[in-house]
Amino acid sequence: MSETNTKKRSLSGIKPTGTGNPHLGNYMGMIQPAIDLQDDYEAFYFVADYHSLTSMRDAETMKRSTKVITAYFLAFGLDIEKSAFFRQSDIPEVTELTWMLSCVTPMGRLERAHSYKDAVAKGVAGELNHGVFSYPVLMASDILIYDSDIVPVGADQIQHLEMARDMATKFNIAFGGDYLKLPEARVQEDVAVVPGLDGRKMSKSYGNTIEPLLPSKKLRKQVMKIETSSTPMTEVMDHTDCTAFALYKLFASEEEQAEMIENYARPDFGYGHAKQALFEKMDERFAPYRDRYNELLEKPEYLEEVLQAGAERVRPSVEDVMERVREAVGMPRRPSFRTK
Ligand code: ADP
Ligand code: TRP
């Protein structure tokens, strides 16, 4: 541990969902950037199962989806020799810190969160469960409980990071000390918002996703569903306003992109060709990971061991922070804490 202890810490979480596997937006915006940080940072990544409870109502789906995400991270190269991958709920102290943060967070701050404001605009705010309203507090706790330095996420999570920093500051001021460390969002600009099949942000909730580790045939089927304009084949296609091209850019070299732009101007080149080219690029990129992913899914016990080992690995830093904040608010150290 002495080597990793000198490194700064990268932390992130991803919700298990009932509606499908992680999508290309999750992969490009969060999974791959997070994995890429594991050499230079001490990486702590988790499945945000408490967060999923705001909408998930099926225990079997929760379990299956947790394993799917774990297999994703491992297949894409998270190295569990040096990084931790764990289940959020295996660190129940995170809910304890959530309460402490709740008590220094003004309601007005939560009312200004995008998701809540959207609910107000739709006139359904009163029907939201309390978990949805207080979601950003749990997320702040997730981050602060590990003394995280950076948090790799897609652009849609920036507001949550700002809220986490605010809560840490409020707590530190309220109790008069530097108890909680202020984290920073790490957003990779070129993939901050990956577009989905319909051109809007790719998101489970819009049903416009492409799932990179699907078998080849199914992947092709999804790619072919990308919505394109109805420009007739003989007219010049506009690559600047084309989802297929926006996605192609994520996989192609500069020269390949230039070649594709020329293709768009050709009379014998249509959107079908553009989508086929995108599919081929994606298939080539993801094929090696697909087999590993499928093998891992066949080993649920192993995946469970990985999650448990991950929780063990992060536990000392949790106890460290909890001891600090409990002392700050006037609560004694818990006898069960193992550190020190
Ligand atoms: P969804 O919008 O499908 O519900 P999540 O909110 O579970 O996705 O996102 C998990 C992670 O993936 C977050 O860090 C988020 O910022 C990132 N992410 C999700 N969709 C995209 C996207 N279209 N482009 C870039 N990053 C994304
Ligand atoms: N809210 C994040 C999402 O919807 C998931 C998440 C929960 C998270 N806790 C986190 C991300 C802590 C980063 C850090 O994608």
Image: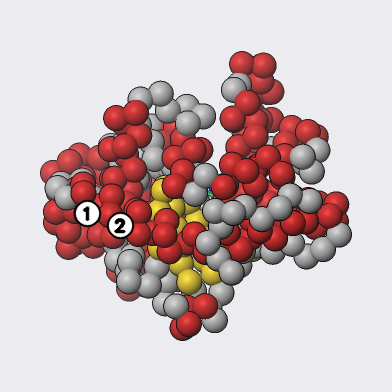
Residue designated by label 2? 306
Q: In which quarter of the image is residue 18?
A: top left
Query: What residue sits 86% from the left and 59% below the top?
Result: 176
**Rendered residue at 44%/52% (across/down):** 46
Which residue matches tag 1?
302
Return the residue found at the far front.
Answer: 335
Q: Is residue 192 above or below residue 51?
A: below
Q: Are marks 2 and 1 in contact (CB under 8 Å)?
A: yes
Between 335 and 253, the one lying in front of the other is 335
Q: How far apart are marks 2 and 1 (CA)?
A: 6 Å
Q: What element does badge 2 sit on?
A: helix
* Type of amino acid at the residue the image marks with label 1: Tyr
Q: Please name whichever residue, 144 or 301, is drawn nearer the observer in this view of the structure.
A: 301
The residue under the point 84% across, 55% down is 175
| Residue 276 screen position, x and y as percent | 21, 50
Q: Is residue 181 left or right of residue 215?
A: right
Q: Is residue 163 visible?
A: yes
Q: Tell me the quadrant of the picture where the N terminus can be found.
A: bottom left
- From the viewer's side, name the closer residue of 72 and 234: 72
Which residue type does callout 2 highlight?
Val
Q: Can residue 249 be seen in this view?
A: no
The image quadrant that residue 81 belongs to is bottom left
